[in-house]
Amino acid sequence: MLPPVISVKGKPFECGQQYGTQARKIIQENVAVYFEMWRTLWGAERKDILPKSHALMPVIGEYDADLLDELEGLAKGAELSIDEIVALNARYEINFSLGISSLYHGGGCTSVSSLTPVTRDGHTLIGQTWDWLPRFQEFNVILKAEQKGKPAVVTQPEAGVLAHRGMNSAGIGACFNGMSSNRDVFGVAVPFLLIMRRILNSESYSQALQAVFQAKATVSGNFLIAHRDGEAIDLEVSPLDVGFLYPEGGILTHSNHFIALKNREGFADILRSIYPDTLFRHQRARHLLEQDKGHIDVSSFQRVFRDHFSHPNSICRHVDERVDGIKQWVTLYSAIMDLSEPAMYVARGYPCQSEYEKVDCSDLFQR
């Protein structure tokens, strides 16, 4: 079953207000759950969180004034404060600043892309699994934005967030994976999930890459960005540097550890020691796709995302009964995007137990 589909149209503030109005209840619930988690796990009260998010507003506005306008419209429509909405869009950075790595016990997103020379119909495909705490599965939406002066966007974020995995009418698709290093701190910087929206607002591939390089990073994360004309680049972002990876044999995969930035002096990769499954998940995805090389299609991606090698610490991440409940990271959603058709396919829950449903993009992506 697809999450709620929210369709918006117009200028940034108008799109945000429509989003907030249509998804008001689920956004309010998502905000409440995050603030309760921050309080119960780490003792961080609203008075601790909201000043941090408020401090991000100037740097967001300087990076992209339209994003700040959309957040303000979103806050108005959802009947929440702008500080609460910014906190939700900065939840990745806030989680890491509070010590989210203490909750890791295996699991994590796996992103993959296959390019025109190796796919069945010469299409460019990109997709990922999204692993997170089960309590957040209920708070996802599909956001469809017809924007004035920008490409149309289809993305599947948490309710109240402007973007996560998604695609646009200019042929760009992007996925985001979590990463962590010893250089990471919460700082006054543009949240990664807002950078994702800037990527998806881009009219060209160079603009999409520029969206990452223009933003200062104080924590680590990974962007896999593809274009329907047969290009893909993976960007490993850290406070130290931005590393980049190109496809090999038409296939590009990534999980949650540094590859391009490994072995830098004074730089330590945190997540690979906490859950070593990241070391094989991206390679496992590559091996599975290579079996279909020359005729890779959406079903090939489905097979990757349903894979149980090293279960439950697999690409299709299941509950691990050996660990505490709070550490039960599982695959909540997975998405596959055919940038050439174009189309998005979404599965709720474990991919092995779910059918992928097609998101109708015909109203936005008419080529």
Image (cartoon, rainbow, N blue to C red):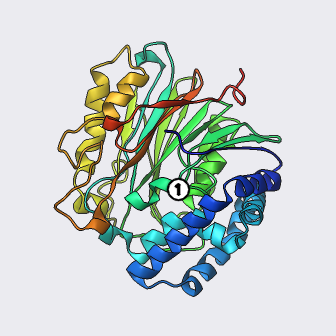
Residue 200 point in image, percent of width and height: 64, 43
Residue 80 point in image, percent of width and height: 70, 70
Query: Do we see residue 237 in this rendering?
Result: no
Q: Quadrant of residue 66?
A: bottom right
Residue 323 point in image, percent of width and height: 20, 64
Query: Do we see residue 221 in this rendering?
Result: yes
Left or right, residue 154 beside residue 133: right
Q: Is residue 153 above or below residue 337?
A: below
Q: Nearer the viewer, residue 80 or 291?
A: 80
Disc 1 element? helix
Q: Nearer the viewer, residue 57 or 24?
A: 24
Q: Residue at x 29, y 47 (%)?
A: 317
Q: Quadrant of residue 292?
A: top left
Position of the C terminus by quadrant: top right
The local crowd at label 1, few if under 14, some if 14 to 19, many if 20 or more residues have their Cα within 10 Å, is: many
Q: Is residue 197 above or below residue 96?
A: above
- Read off the residue under disc 1: 139
Q: Residue at x 51, y 19 (%)?
A: 123
Q: Quadrant of residue 264?
A: bottom left
Left or right, residue 221 beside residue 211: left
Left or right, residue 254 beside residue 170: left
- Please name the amino acid that badge 1 sits on: Phe
Residue 117 point in image, percent of width and height: 44, 16
Q: Nearer the viewer, residue 107 or 213?
A: 107
